[in-house]
Every structure is written in C-alpha cells, then in structure tokens.
Amino acid sequence: MSAYTYHPLRHEGSIRLLSCYGDTGHQYQLCEMHEISTRSYHALSYTWGPQTVKVPISINGFGFQVTPNLLDALMSFFSKNPQDLLWVDAICIDQSNLEERDQQVRRMMDIYGEAEMVIVHLGYSRTLRTDTLSRYSDQSHEHYIQATVKLIHYLFHLSKRTGEKTESNIAPKYRSSGLLNNVMHPSWDLLRRLYHDSWFERLWVIQELHVAKQTHVMWLSERIPWEFLDGAAKYILRPGHNPPLNRSVREYLPRIGARRLFQVALKGMDPENILSVLHSTQGTKCSDPRDRLYAILGTIDDVEDAEVDYAMSVQDIYKRWAVRRITRKKSLDILGACADSGRWNDLPSVPDLRRPWGQDKQLWEQNFRGDHSRWTESEFGKLMEQQRVNPGPHLRIVGGTSLLVFGVNVGRVTHLSSPADMVLDLTDTANAEKSLFFWITDWAHWISRKTTNLLCLNEAHLNLVSVILRTGEDFGLRNYYYKQLARLKKCFRNPPIPRIYPGKANICPETRASEEAEYFDNDPIAHENLEVLQEFERIFSPRVCGCQIFIMSNGPELGISASNCKVRVDDEVWLLHGMDNPVVLRQNDKGSRLITPCYVSVDWDIWGEKYRPALKQIVII
C-alpha cells in the first residue's frame, strides 16, 4: 500500500479531522475543515508511546504508521463514537512541515478549546488487561474495572462531603460496599496503576486540559469524567480523612500519581508568570526540549518573550527568550531559574529547561509568594541603589551572551556540608521524620566541628535555624521547629544533639537545663498523630531534602542551596541588582558564571554597616 501524502492546508484557519469508515477498525480518512466552528469534533489527549515500534493504518486508502498506543486510542474511541470526528496531533498535523507545525502549535489552545470534548486515553489497555487483570481470576475483568470506577466515584463524593463521618448520605449507587478499607481488593491496585499512567507526566496535557470545555478519560472499557478523577485525588491527598481510613489503606494510597494530577490541573501556578508555570512543570516530560516553552503558552498570559519556531536550535530558543525578557522587564528575575545552566557548556547563564532546574525549591516558593524580606528592601539595599553613579539601567546585554550588572560581593564559600540526599518512603511519614532529624543534627554537628569560637558557634547554630527555615523573622515557625526537634529527640532514644534550641551564649547551665526541659517535657504533640507527622513532613522536607549548607568567609554566616547545583569551595556569594536573592558565582577568565540563587543568614543592615561594601560592575556570562 502506498504511503499517505499530505497536501498543504489551504487556509490559515484550517485543521484536518479524522473519521472512521469500514468494519476493520483500521481504516480512516482525513477531511479538512476551514473553520473550527463549522462542525463539532473531539480532540485526543494521549501519550505517543515509544517511536521505535509502529503499526500500519489506512488513511484515505493509503498507508500510515502510528504507535501502538495511538492505534489503541483510535480503536477505543471509534468503537463507541463511530460517527464523530477526531483531532489527533500525530495525524492531523504534517509533522515534517516545520511551517505548518509552527502554525498549528500556535493554535493548539484554540484547537483544544473549541473541541466539543477532550478525550484522554490512558495507557496500553491490552497490556494492562493481560498483566494485571489476569492475576484476579475469581471474577470477570469487567467486574474489577467497574469496581474501580465505583471506588473513584465514591472518593469523589467523599471529597465533596468532607464533614460526613459515615457514607449514609452518599447516594447508594456511589457507595463503596466495603472497598474503602479493603486494601487487598484489586480495585486499589488498578487505581494505583491508573494514577501512575505515563499520561500524567506529559507536559502538553496541562494546556490541553486547561482550555477544554469538558474532559472524559478513556480507561480500559470505561469513560470517567475528569472531575471525578480530580475529586478522588483531592480526597487521597488530604492530610486527614473523614470518614477515617485504616492504616493499611493510608499506606497504599497512590499519593505520587495523585500529586501528578494536581500538577496537571495547574494547582499552585500563576498564569501571569511564565517562570512560575515553568518551575511547577519541570518534572513533566516532552520529546522535544523546545516544547518546554511552547507547550505552556496556551495556559499563561506572560507570553511576550517566547515565539514558536521549530527551525531554531534549542540553545538559540532559550537564549532568545532570556534576552527578550531581560530587555523588556529590565529585571534579572529570569536568572532566578538558573542552576548551573552552563554545565553542558552550550548555554550562557540562562535557564536550561532541558533538565530540572536543580534549584532550592523552598526559596523559590517563598519568592513566588513574597512572604520573606528581600535584601533590596533593606536600608542597605536602598543605599546600594543610591551608590550607582551611572544613571542608566542597572544591567546591559553585551554581545548577546553576556550581562553587565551592578553587584556587591558578600563573601566566599569556605566549607561545604554533606548534601541531604534523603530517600523518602512517601507512604511512611515516620521514615521522613527520621531522615529529617538525622540531617538537621548532622548539619549541627558539622558546624560544631568547623567552628572553634564559642560565641561564633552559638551564633552559627542560630544561623543554621535561619537557613533551614529560609527566614530569620518568622518566630512562630522558629518555635514550631524547636518544639518538633525536642519531640523527635525523645522519640529517637535521645541521641546526642548540639545546642540547636533557643538560648543565649552566656546563659548559665542551670537556666539552660530548665529551658531545655520546657521544650522537651511540655510537648503536647503526640508522635502517633498522623496529621502532625504529615504537617512536619510538609513543612520541613522541602527545606532540607536535596539541600546543602555552606560556611562563608565572614565569620559565622551560613548559606544554603540545592546540592545538585554543585557549589564549590571558593565560589563567591553576590548580591545583584535586579535579583531578590543572593547568588553563587564562579569566576573564570571571561567573567562570572551564575551557579545558583541561595539563601544566606545575613541581617543586611547590620552587615552593610559593618563591612560598608563597594558596589561593582561585573560581567555575567
């Protein structure tokens, strides 16, 4: 059979749509529509699957190769919707025509937004039937599939009725019939696999669902409204459950997959800030690294600096985006997304979206929420602004690849702690507590070994609390931190621990002992309280996990950064005009490369008065 040949779209507003004919389920035809609104259609959201294996279908009587997952999706859809039209990116866009591809990607928001319904296809149905359902032979496959859908419906209705203590007010057709606390029932295994489907990892699905009028999920033989999966995830991720779940079910809940679903639903993202969406979606997958930018353009308003052009290289796309944003905003906020972006030596100090940012996530979140003081807001920061004798902009792009900026050298990295490479079992919160407690006390012991002066040691331990919390001003959080450490010290058999509770260096031993007793013995928090454990994990895991402490050259001041940014001894910490946080820079013969933003335990007004630093111009490469 001859291969299908695309003909150019005749109008800029045209799209191709797929329909089915014949009895084999493998024969399709493409028809061109000049206006999206002329006829109703559905849009498919799916995972392409491995490109190494292709299977043939027929389009307009000609051969066409698709992945097995797409064939499975086509057969599932047209078996129940034989008269409907379907838009599928891999077929309806000529992928070899870069001009058409650019034009269609720009219109992706309209294509999915004008569809009557977005159809999500999850996974390889035939493989799941063979590998999973074949283990359960006491009932038919359809019985377990329907039971899983019933469980999803039940969890959804529980999420709507968080105050109910029984299921008596849930409609009978949605009641669980004992499934909720029966962890051995196959429905829980199927639900876990559903939430772990690779579709949830796709970057493009965020835009596809964001603009959809309504969405249904094709899973095995069932159709599930998206809001039911979303509601079930909300219930699974609640810190407590009402009605209560027994412990075995709590440990079995598919939390990781449900968290992916929250990400797909754009939870916690600011559509007016492209950096916020990029940060929140960095764990998703796309086959073309240029789509890191392109796939989210339909979900945000902050799109002035990104332009779809598949003819440009990945490196040129990222550099052009960064230069345009810096020029337009007269700000270095985009450099806050850098984390040793030049590690592969093919990019300057601009965000490298091909890999996770490797950034201090807690610091990023606090910047995004604006809930901590910035050095630029201090009296010292205002004084530095007045020092600039150049009345022009505080930054200038040089040669398209370098930045000339004003900054202040804060100090040099002299010592680096071990990174807190925590491997957490998310179903066992106590495991997280032990790991968190270990790394906090390990850092405290490390500081004690590196600091010989008693007064500096006491200040250094106070600074350790500041860098862990990423704030020196939230006294409520600081007291919570002390109380939790006191509780953990008792829970884990009173291991030796340095002075990491509040107190002054010159306090007498008797008073210190009394002070410690207050924190250790009057603790009202029960270790077995699940909500308390999860709250502790939620607050402190992002502040410790994957982070590294460093000591600076100017006394007891400490800093913290993401360990995978590979900060080194002799790197320098700088304040740059246009950035809210200090940054770690690495010098070479051409200038300074930005390694990562960081947090340091410095009171900027006191530090500025003590050192009176001079403002300098430096070149960021």
Image (cartoon, helix red, strand yellow):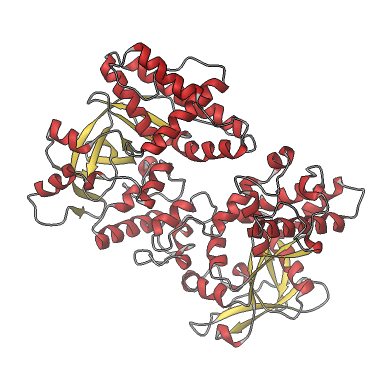
- Quarter holding the C terminus? top left
Q: As drawn, is 505 to the left or to the right of 132?
A: left
Residue 581 against residue 492 in the figure, above or below = below
Provide residue 530's location: percent of width, then percent of height: 62, 37
Q: Is residue 605 left or right of residue 310?
A: left
* Residue 550 can be seen in this image: no
Indicate the quadrant where residue 60 lies: bottom right
Query: What is the residue that sits farthest to the right in this orientation?
Result: 138
Of residues 298 and 461, the one nearer the viewer is 461
Residue appearing at x 63%, y 34% in the figure? 428
From what the image shows, is residue 485 above or below residue 253? above
Q: Residue at x 78, y 73 (%)?
A: 80
Q: Is residue 227 visible?
A: yes
Quadrant of the frame with the N terminus: bottom right
Q: How far across and how far down the image is residue 551, in percent?
A: 31, 26
Q: Position of residue 568 (x, y in %)?
A: 34, 29
How many numbered marks appear? 0
Q: Which residue is outermost to the bottom?
A: 38
Residue sitting at 67 percent across and 46 percent down? Answer: 254
Return the residue found at the far left.
389
Which residue is nearer to you in this view: 244 or 292? Answer: 244
Residues 437 and 295: in front is 437
Residue 49 occupies which quadrant of the picture?
bottom right
Residue ID at (46%, 29%): 483
Left or right: 354 as drawn, with respect to 54: left
Q: Is residue 423 above or below residue 243?
A: above
Residue 480 picture location, percent across and down: 45, 34
